[in-house]
Amino acid sequence: MDLIIESGRDVPNRHPPFYFPGDDLFAAARPRALPIGNLTSQFWANCYLNPLDQFIKRELQCPGYLRYVDDFLLFADDRRTLWRWKAEIAEFLVGLRLRLHDQESTVYPVTNGIPFLGFRVYPDRRRLKRRNGVAFARRFRALRQAVAAGEITPEQLYQSVQGWLAHAAHGDTQGLRRALVSAHPIPRSPL
């Protein structure tokens, strides 16, 4: 555990240091990041954020709450309740030495769609964010070029594409997935 946590020491952090109550001047030098994508990230998020889950369900008594790693949504019938909960959650997170991203944590009517995990979630559908489809199309092109140049194997291309397709399949993306990969067939895994 110490090795994994220590591996985040040199991870660049795009956010300026934040001082919590009781911090001294040396707080700016404290490491503030973990490597994203580490296999333990989900596990540690569940351990560390369990108090937040309990607070939201038991103290706030939020009837609709979901969280994946550090992204979470709360649902209520009125926006005043949601703004109050946001303030209470921000205060609670200080005790965990965490804070909300102000620009990303706001109140949306569900009819407008809620951005979550690379999708825009509506009451009746999930749409992949356009930039995610565009980014995949670019990455797919680069991966095909890397196979042609012998830099990666067809199996590596196949695995990368299958990972993205599995993610995109969580939304209403059948047409998009078909369009992106039908123009360039993906070699099947030999396994």
Image: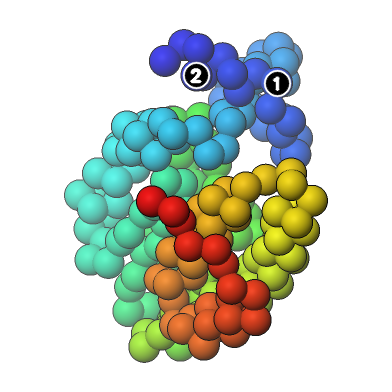
Which of disc 2 and disc 1 is earlier in sequence?
2
Viewer can see residue 81? no
Image point 34% across, 42% down: which residue?
52
Query: Callout 1, which amino acid?
Result: Asp
Image point 68% across, 27% down: which residue?
11
Q: As drawn, is 171 to the left or to the right of 156?
A: left
Viewer can see residue 48? yes
Residue holding disc 1:
10
Question: Label 1 neighbourhood size at 10 Å, few (<14), some (14-19), many (20+)?
Answer: few
Residue 24: give x, y in percent of width and height: 66, 14
Query: Callout 2, which amino acid?
Result: Ile
Say what secondary structure mark 1 lies in. Answer: loop
Residue holding disc 2:
4
Residue 3: give x, y in percent of width and height: 50, 12
Position of 142 relative to 127 (above/below): above
Q: Quadrant of residue 66?
A: bottom left
Say what secondary structure mark 2 lies in. Answer: helix
